[in-house]
Image (spheres, rainbow, N blue to C red):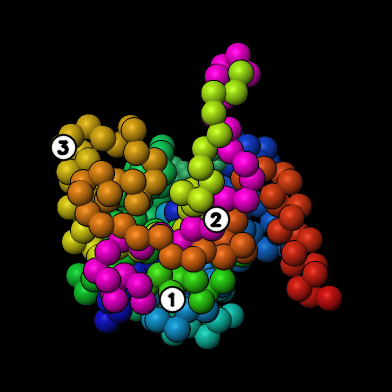
Amino acid sequence: APTVAVIVVAAGSGTRLGHAEPKAFVLLHMRPLLDHALDSIFGMNESVQVVVVVPGDRVADAHALAARAAARNGAPASAGPGPAAASVTPDPAGTITIVAGGRTRQESVDHGLSALLPSIEVVLVHDAARALTPAALCDQVVAAVRATGHGIIPGLPVVDTIKRVAASGAILGTVDRSELSAVQTPQGFPRAMLEAARTWAAANGRFEALTDDAALVADAGHPVTVIAGHPLAFKITTPEDLERADLLLHAAAA
Ligand code: CTP
Ligand code: MG
């Protein structure tokens, strides 16, 4: 049984991208963003439980999509179509699970955590919107969690000069860029650490303030370390980001 799970959160609506369909189902080179994202996961050396969190009315779609992605990547799992209404529908092999998401990313992560197999010791949480993330980055996060026992998040140095600006537009100061890191996903944690941090956050009313998983874990007093991220792990948020992903895939195919 796998000891590593990747929770792929794909239940957002993609307001800023501005398409009719939810962002994870928007096409990039004729394939949904989620399909690209699953290539990163099925391409890992580690054999993992994959938990995909999608909008409630997309659970059946996601089953079919995940089964195709697994087959394309030679993964052994089979994900049969489950009842669309069920929130948790494990496939027979138990390694691909499709879960309905929540109103916020945090709720979606929670729904994903509820589907973990008992054998899981390390959990990665990954944005489907980071559709071009290299599989190697996912394996590196797993290796670093195992080596350190810490929470591990990929990050890149910030290249722009960053100003603190008042509502009026007045510059308040320049932030020391050398201390900054633009963080990405997958974010990896020992399972027990992530679950304890979430329990702590819930008990202390911290969910509202803390948007990413690493912030929750650090807030609960656990060590979190940044490792080198990858430029291809950028998040597709705006139409310009989708255009950039399209151009990168064209360049890779040429
Ligand atoms: N996400 C999720 N459940 C939510 C909100 C977000 O699973 N209720 C996921 C998204 O599907 C995405 C990741 O969290 O893969 C990062 O969120 P973001 O890029 O903000 O995606 P959206 O919330 O869909 O986009 P927007 O904020 O523009 O509406
Ligand atoms: Mg969002």
Residue at 24% in and 69% down: 149
The image shows residue 33 at horizontal and vertical percentages of 62, 58
Q: Is residue 9 left or right of residue 219?
A: right
The image shows residue 6 at horizontal and vertical percentages of 39, 66
Looking at the image, is mark 2 or mark 1 earlier in the sequence? 1
Residue at 61% in and 62% down: 231
Dots 2 and 3: beta carbons under 8 Å? Answer: no
In depth, the one of 233 and 175 nearer the eye is: 175
* Mark 3, residue position: 203
* Mark 2, residue position: 157
* Mark 1, residue position: 139
Vertical comparison of 89 with 208: above or below: below
At mark 2, the secondary structure is: strand
In depth, the one of 194 and 118 nearer the eye is: 194
Q: Is residue 242 magenta?
A: no
The image shows residue 253 at horizontal and vertical percentages of 79, 75
The residue mark sitting in front, 2 or 1, is 2
